[in-house]
Amino acid sequence: MLVESELVQTPEFNNLVARHRAAIVANGTFFAKNSQKTVMGNMVAAGRFLKYSQWENFGTTLGLRVGNKPEMVTARVDGKPQWNQHWLSITCGPRLLRQGQIWLKPDVEGFKDPHVLGTGERTAIGFPADGTKLFLINFDSGLTLQQEAQVMKAIGCHEAMNLDGGASKAFAASGKILVPAGRPLTNVIVVYDSKNPAPADLQQSWVRFQKGDRPIIPGA
């Protein structure tokens, strides 16, 4: 399994699904309503920075390190993530699970939007204690953060965080759109597997990362 994120140039979800030919394509993180549609947090995909600011300290980051090892870092609690050690890195939240326990402190992470804190249609991502799987879950009905956290724990996650939801919620499997996006998206999570292999350049970037190539921090 190979997972990447993308800042998109063609925001219509059906076009993204057709282009990637992946096992899974799903919505990613929050984005601003400004003209630039700025995504939340720093973002690394295929071992390179798509967005970087040294001042980012908001929300929770999921990163994939060497050996496909996932980690979850809440900046205002754990310190800033080592983004340049991630092949994939996406920041969102609030965090739902921490070390196997429900952990909901959205105010600490910097979340204030009532649409995030209330009841809504959600997407979540997480992984079990051994880090051998990623769970990417799209919920059909409205949930509170507490309910979302309880579900992620029940399915076996040790760490989990909330992703964008509401009108941004979108999900496709093997080219079939199961949940259409309610609006154009600025970023997506893409998952490849043996039946839906990643493009050669993406596979090559993964190999280079394992051998020591690291994302170069812009301006460093």
Image (tube, rainbow, N blue to C red):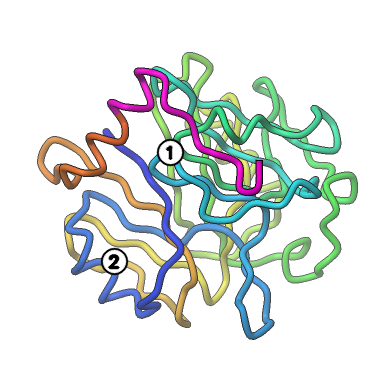
Amino acid at circle 2? Leu
Decide which of 118, 106 is in the foreground and name it. 106
Image quadrant assignment for residue 211: top left
Quarter of the image that includes the N terminus: top left
Q: Secondary structure at mark 1?
A: loop
The residue drawn where x is 73% and y is 64% is 116
Quick check: 110 left or right of 151?
A: right
Q: Secondary structure at mark 2?
A: strand
What is the span of residues highlighted in magenta in the rendered image?
Answer: 207-220
Which secondary structure type mostly characterizes the magenta part of the structure?
loop
Decide which of 30, 88 is in the foreground and name it. 88
Decide which of 203, 156 is in the foreground and name it. 203
Quarter of the image that includes the C terminus: top right
Among the two numbered marks 2 and 1 on one chain, the one whose residue lies closer to the N terminus: 1
Residue 120 location (% of width, % of height): 64, 67
Q: Nearer the viewer, mark 2 or mark 1?
A: 1
The residue drawn where x is 30% and y is 36% is 205
Residue highlighted by disc 2: 178
Amino acid at circle 1? Gly
Residue highlighted by disc 1: 47
Q: Residue farthest to the left?
A: 195
* Residues at marks 2 and 1 touching, judged by CB atoms closer than 8 Å: no
Image quadrant assignment for residue 212: top left
Badge 2 crowding class, 10 Å Cα cut-off, few under 14, some 14 to 19, many 20 or more, is: few
Examine the rendered structure and indicate whether residue 2 appears above or below residue 49.
Answer: above
Quick check: 117 left or right of 150?
A: right
Badge 1 crowding class, 10 Å Cα cut-off, few under 14, some 14 to 19, many 20 or more, is: many
Quick check: 18 left or right of 191?
A: left
Residue 175 located within the stretch drawn in magenta: no
The residue drawn where x is 27% and y is 76% is 14
